[in-house]
Amino acid sequence: MIVVASLLPATAAAHSFVEPYLLPVPFWLYVYACAATLVATFAIFGYFLGRESAHDTASISSIASLPTAATGTRFLLASLRGGALACLLLTVVAGFVGSGDPLRNIAMPLFWMVFLLGFAYVVALIGDLFELANPWRTIVDFIARVVPTFDRPRLAYPHWLGYYPALALYMSLIWLELFVLPRPATLSTALTIYTLITLAGVSAFGSRQWFHHGEMFSVFFRIVSWAAPIEYVAAKDFIRVRLRPPLRGAIDARPEHASLVLFILFMLSSTAYDAIHDTEFWLELYWQHLVHIAQPLWGTDMVQSQNVLMRGYFIYQRLGLLLSPLAYFGLYVLMLAWAKRLTRSPIPVRKLALDFAPSLVPIAIVYNVTHYYTLLLMQVSKLGRVATDPFGLGWNLFGLGMPEPASLLDMGFVWHSQVALVLIGHVSSVYLAHVAAMRVFANRRQAIVSQLPLLLLMVAYTAIGLYILSLPIGSPQIVGD
């Protein structure tokens, strides 16, 4: 078994301690403290927040209205769109003509680090700038100037299709990240194919419908922006910038299709799966348990059956990703069905699933931050060198020297900051679930009772999140206790 396991590819996890780390207090105390905080928060929200909290809109105010005909606004929008389009073109070109080494080619850090991670955190803080800068929308607008009918719908967008195109594309992106060799040319090919799919979707269903339902990045950043205290309302003649309380976007969101619920849950489950799929726990689950259960299929000689076992492992890894949102969805629906039974409410579980889905968004955001922010910090120092030699051809456009080696992170700070972020995200979700319950159920008692299963769900998600963060990769991370 050791011989076979040693053949598995080694990867570095962004969330994990690379050296054994002795926690200041036993791990179970962290879980207990977080769970106790969630319970206390639930009690405080239940006591102090009334029905008016769910409908208060007076705190939203416009802080600017930018007329699109004004020179300054046109320049700002042109800069955003031009910069985003230039980054997309640079990524694609660099992947095709630059070095095949992902560490020397700007395509990889520009897309995976700057765009998918860094820009996502910017959107969570200051609103959906991607809606204004979307490079694929810029390409569509340019084509529509040449062919005026290009972005007009030729087919009615079917309601049953919902957000499934965006979900399928998002799952494909995470599949590419986890299971395909990190070659710049592969990324460029994927982005080219994605651009063609976007153009085909716009040509078939029109620009408005496709960018709302089918364009993966528009859906992703729109959901992330629900946490932001700023929103941008674009109209034909102006762009209004509005200041709102944090999480207000999640309160106002009204998911209209089950596929959007699955999209939100996949944001959560894919991050958790990325964090767990190379841990000792996940490897041992296959090599020490599932292998023995399936022994009649491969025999008794592990070395002779190495190819069969490895194929089984690759299938096991990929099925884990595909089934992860269904596992989270099953637990989510189970808790809602329990809430429906406790309250004896006639509201269908499907409607409850739609109404409470936005309350999971803070958890999805903080999971992403906790698992990747250390990786982002460690890679920032290398971005300057990659930018001065974007194709990895030995250039030095900006006269920069070799980057300084990244300093080691304080593991104590990393762990405690991750715990704090997980807790903040779950407390925010408890608040949003309470506001949703006050809006959905007929009276205060029903709303409070309905939150008991969801509180249990939040506690379970907290424990799972902390457990995944603590799992070792290659060597134990939690020593003693």
Image (cartoon, grey):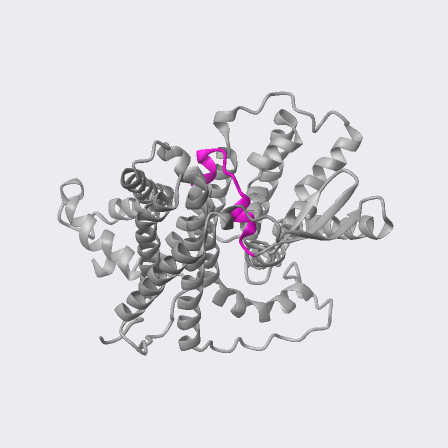
Query: In screen coordinates, is 199 left or right of 424?
Result: right
Q: Residue at left 67%, top 48%? A: 232
Query: In screen coordinates, is 428 left or right of 273?
Result: right
Query: In screen coordinates, is 294 left or right of 68?
Result: left
Q: Residue 241: where, in percent of width, then height?
A: 70, 51
Viewer-closest of 398 and 362: 362
Residue 293, relative to residue 197: is it above or below?
below
Q: Residue 169: where, in percent of width, then height?
A: 51, 39
Q: Residue 176: where, in percent of width, then height?
A: 47, 47
Q: Decide whether residue 258 is among the magenta residues.
A: yes
Viewer-closest of 114 and 133: 133
Total marks in image: 0
Q: Residue 202: where, in percent of width, then height?
A: 64, 30
The quadrant the N terminus occupies is: bottom left
Q: Residue at left 77%, top 43%? A: 238
Identify the image quadrant of residue 470.
bottom left
Residue 300, relative to residue 366: is it above or below?
above
Residue 408, relative to residue 116: is it above or below?
below
Identify the image quadrant of residue 135.
top right
Q: Which residues are magenta?
A: 246-262
Q: Decide whether residue 157 is among the magenta residues.
A: no
Identify the residue at the far right of this view.
71
